[in-house]
Image: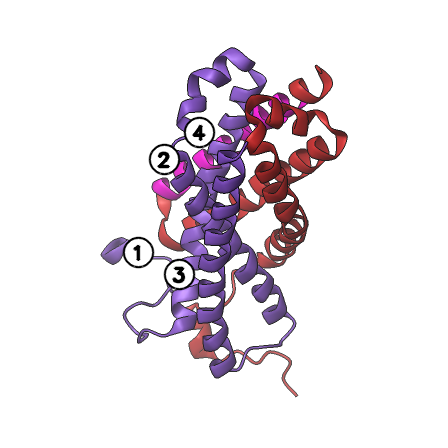
Chain colours: A red, B purple
Amino acid sequence: MATDFRTPMSRVKGHGSAGDGTHHYIAHRVSAIILAITVPLLIWGIMSAAPGGFDGFVEYIESTFGALTLLTFVSAAFFHGRSGLTESILDYFQGGKRMALLLVATLVSIGFWLLAVLSILRIWLGA
Amino acid sequence: MGSNWNDKRPMSPHLQVWRWHPTMLSSILHRASGIALFFALIKLSIFIAVLAAGPDVFMKYSSLFYSPLGVIGFFIAVGILVYHLMNGIRHMIWDSGRLLAPPVANMMSIAIIAAAAVIAVILTFILVSSVGGA
């Protein structure tokens, strides 16, 4: 019995999976699970800090729980966001535009992730 | 895009071949909310940086954060965040092979959109009343 079920026509048309999606699929879902846990904590944290203004927010980030929640959230979120943007860019652009957008998505993600992490550490450890 | 498109794989979503239905709407909204949330995440990073810059810098912008514009921003951000979160959880349930029957999936699409709107209204109401009463 044949082990390859693809017809010659399917090979000519060239449709089918790209063959490299498994890693992306798993990484996207692992970061999604981390976000599903941290997002409710983040919303709760922001909402309870907001009435206190500057002091309220700083107090939240100075607490170990608040700082760790935020650090975990922004790291998982920028990873997940870049992963999702990559998927959308691959779906609608190609060639030079695709390369440029992928590069921008990566650099913006790393840059703002660094800004967030350094700011959180400055408030948390500088307290 | 268009006639320059020479990737061998088809482009999605296939707007020309699908008639409108709720799961299509929730799929498009999931992608749109995901992209919007990336920009909200950048704004959150800037907000934390403003906090880290100290009280003087924060006070310069605090009238913006605590304005009607800030409330609208919170409402939109929390609404699309809650939508994306709930629909994302459904995606993982879908991955396990459950809830895929079209009538169930269509009904849940509407339910998730409605629930996200209700939760966003409730959270915004709680926020406004707690900040106003402080």
Amino acid type for the residue under numbered disc 4:
Phe
* Residue located beneath label 1 in the image: B5
The kind of residue tagged 3 is Ile
- Dots 3 and 1: beta carbons under 8 Å? no
Q: Which range is magenta?
A: A96-121
Determine crowd level at label 3: few under 14, some 14-19, many 20+ residues with C-alpha closer than 10 A.
few
SS for dot 2: helix
* Residue B48 falls inside the magenta stretch: no
Q: Position of residue B112 (x, y in %)?
A: 49, 65
- Could you give the CA–CA distance between mark 4 and mark 1, rounded to whole angstroms? 44 Å
Q: Amino acid at mark 1?
A: Trp
The quarter in which the N terminus of chain A is drawn is: bottom right
The residue that appears at 45% across and 53% down in the rendered structure is: B121
Q: Is residue B46 above or below residue B29?
A: above
At label 2, the amino acid type is Leu
Q: Are marks 4 and 1 on the same chain?
A: yes
Task: Indicate which disc, 4 or 1, sits on the residue closer to the N terminus.
Answer: 1
The circle drawn on residue B104 is none
Q: Which residue is mark 3?
A: B28
Q: Residue at x 42, y 78 (%)?
A: A9
Q: Which residue is mark 2?
A: B69
For mark 2, name the chain: B
- Give the mark, 3 or 4, whose residue is nearer the N terminus: 3
**In front: label 3 or label 4:** 4
Q: Nearer the viewer, residue B34 or B65?
A: B65
Report helix, strand or loop for mark 4: helix
